[in-house]
Image (spheres, grey):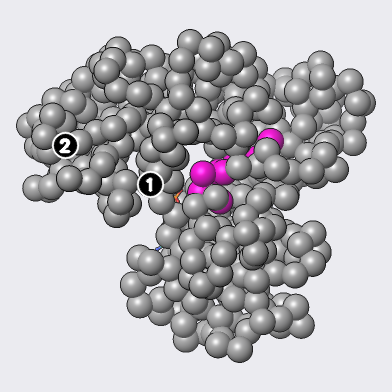
Amino acid sequence: MSEHVLVINAGSSSLKYSLMDTGSGDAVASGLVEKIGEDQSHHVHHGPSGDAEDDQAVADHEAALEAAVRAFEKHGPALDSVDIVAVGHRVVHGGDRFAEPALVDNDLIAAVNDLVPLAPLHNPANLEGIEVARRLFPDLPHVAVFDTAFHQTLPPYAYTYAVPASWLDDYGIRRYGFHGTSHAFVSEQAARLLDRDPGEVNVIVLHLGNGCSATAVRAGKSVDTSMGMTPLEGLVMGTRSGDLDPAIHGHLARVADRTAEETDRALNKESGLKGLTGVNDFREVSRRRADGDESAQLAFDVYCYRLKKYIGAYYAVLGTVDAIVFTAGVGQNSAEVRAAALDGLESLGIHLDPARNADLGGVLAGAFVSTDDSPVAVLVIPTNEEWQIARQAVEVLSR
Ligand code: AMP
């Protein structure tokens, strides 16, 4: 019987769960409870016999996880019929305390709590998920897998901001990076596709989802990444601006009387594709661009130009690049983004094959979209963060 891990990703008003087969990476069942605490919540459970939906109000995370357990009982598979070895929890911010996944105990909870100032929206929700799951599954080991952990190998010159040195000790101000679970998974899969050992390849991973980040991976280790102290820095995203002049905060405070919180919120929730076009969904931006919408065209150009700049920067960081990998919703599905971001980079040995790029032909295991003789391979690899969390949970148990 294969081993399974129940993977939980608790957000401020949502709870996502997947029952992962650790061997195959398949989700045996999964689900999402949204709008927790509102009058009408939404719960969808994808089980072996199809999808089941429920719109009853779910008061809190405990009720959400109880609803998930009921959905497993009703729509399958019954949790006691499956060999579950652990519960794996996604935790956004591990600061510089966690370079690896770790078994949940009271010390870990206290440490994640200490890191709340660095991730005020995410860490409290993640902790809530952990506490609720420990109550409902007291006999299973719980493992925390941190979004930041993969990037703890960044050298000091890559994670240090050129600000007063005391800010690091006083406020923890440095680059941490995020999406680490995805970057770790995808860079390892890239080595596999290249038929090489992860310890001997250099890759640039572009995780382009609603959140976007680029990572330079040297010999299996993250050496630079575009997200910073928070997930705001770097690439243009669905609703986040990515890089911008830090003086904009002060300027808006002076000329528009905007508080730090207001500007923070606008840069995180009302910027990026949404700020430029009014919509954060890339598919809609693409549709509008195809219809000749000028703001959609500009947003597309800003998005791809920023990507190209990071590819160039990380090429310089790595010196030699074996592969550029596109992953997540936009990276896996948008041939036009891949083509635009890599356009004109042939002199760097990056040769996209237009026919392969346009038609991946079922990308489940990953696909080459570069020409056979391209010195730098261009790959499209589906990310599977849940599987990575499940595998890491098992690894922690075997230590
Ligand atoms: P993720 O966060 O990985 O789920 O990615 C979400 C983003 O991927 C959204 O902006 C979607 O619009 C985008 N996306 C999903 N499917 C496609 C597609 N077929 N073509 C372009 N973008 C897509």
Say which quarter of the image contains residue 38: top left
Dot 2 falls on a residue whose secondary structure is loop
Other residues around mark 1 within 10 Å, as few (<14) / some (14–19) / many (≥20): many
Q: Which residue is mark 2?
A: 82
Can residue 297 be spotted in the picture?
A: no
Q: Which residue is mark 1?
A: 387
What residue is at 32 percent from the left and 46 percent from the top? Answer: 22
- Amino acid carrying mark 2 in the image: Val
Q: Is residue 282 left or right of residue 53?
A: right
Q: Is residue 283 left or right of residue 153?
A: left
Q: Is residue 76 left or right of residue 145?
A: left
Name the spot of residue 48 as percent of width and height, x first. 13, 47
What residue is at 61 percent from the left and 67 percent from the top? Answer: 324
Given the current orientation, which residue lies at the most extreme bottom position?
Answer: 373
- Amino acid carrying mark 1 in the image: Trp
Q: Which residues are magenta?
A: 176-183
Ligand 1 near label 1 (Cβ, under 8 Å)? no
What residue is at 26 percent from the left and 42 percent from the top? Answer: 3
Q: Quadrant of the N terminus?
A: top left
Say which quarter of the image contains residue 275: top right
Residue 234 lies, with reference to residue 250, above or below; the image says below
Q: Is residue 199 left or right of residue 65?
A: right
Residue 234 lies, with reference to residue 200, above or below; the image says above
Name the spot of residue 332 as percent of width and height, x first. 46, 63
Which residue is more in the foreground, 199 or 156? 199
Which residue is more in the foreground, 21 or 209? 21
